[in-house]
Image: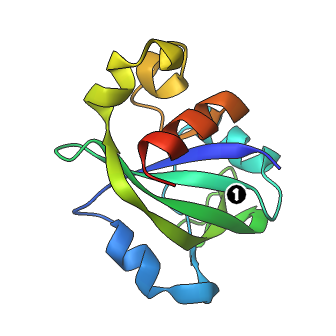
Amino acid sequence: MRYWLFKSETSTWGWDQQVAKGDAGEEWDGVRNYQARNFMREMEVGDRGFFYHSQKDREIVGIIEVIAKAHPDSTTDDDRWECVDIKAVKALSTPVHLDAIKADERLADMVLVKNSRLSVQPVTDDEWRIISDLGGL
């Protein structure tokens, strides 16, 4: 299993909306960045990810699971763009704010710290364990 981070603005798609989709989940659509798309192409069913509220909240709030491998994004006719489907698994007991991530020296090399604009990004096993611990899991 690999780990990932999925970023979304709460005004576009938030954790509560993801949770409301239940086990059916939802496409992680609308990604128009080649690197983020390529990361989704690497994902396998069962991979886990952090759900991150970007913009004003800037915090990891939950854990998701990939439930469908990369497929054409239904929001465009352009066949360059693909997405995966995800479902909510569990909310973090304590959201982990970007400031806390940046302040933790163990997370200094995290993609979120070095390239905060990338909407889909990998998370290492160590980063997963550290953030899960900070989030009360």
The correct choice, above or below, for 56 with respect to 9 in the image is above
Q: Which residue shows up at 61% across the image and 39% down it?
A: 128
| Residue at 48% in and 58% down | 30
Q: Residue reaching furthest left?
A: 56
Q: Tell me residue 19's x, y (percent).
A: 44, 79
Residue 37 location, quadrant: top right
Asked if residue 124 can be seen in this view, the reply is no
| In this picture, residue 125 sits left or right of residue 91 | right
Q: Which residue is mark 1?
A: 79
Residue 11 quadrant: bottom left
Above or below, 123 against 25 in this view is above
Residue 22 x %, y %: 54, 87
**70 or 53: which is nearer to us?**
53
Say what amino acid the circle numbered 1 marks: Asp
Image point (42%, 48%), residue name: 135
How far across and down, in percent of the image, does residue 51 sit?
A: 46, 55
**Residue 97 shown left or right of residue 46 in the figure:** left
- Describe residue 60's horizontal placement relative to residue 130 as left or right: left
Q: Front-most of 2 and 91?
A: 91
Q: Is residue 61 visible?
A: yes
Describe the element under mark 1 as helix, strand or loop: loop
- Residue in view at x 55 percent, y 65 percent: 76
**Residue 43 to residue 104: above or below:** below
- Residue 39 location, x and y as percent? 70, 40
* The one of 127 and 53 positioned closer to us in this rendering: 127
Residue 75 falls left or right of residue 48: left
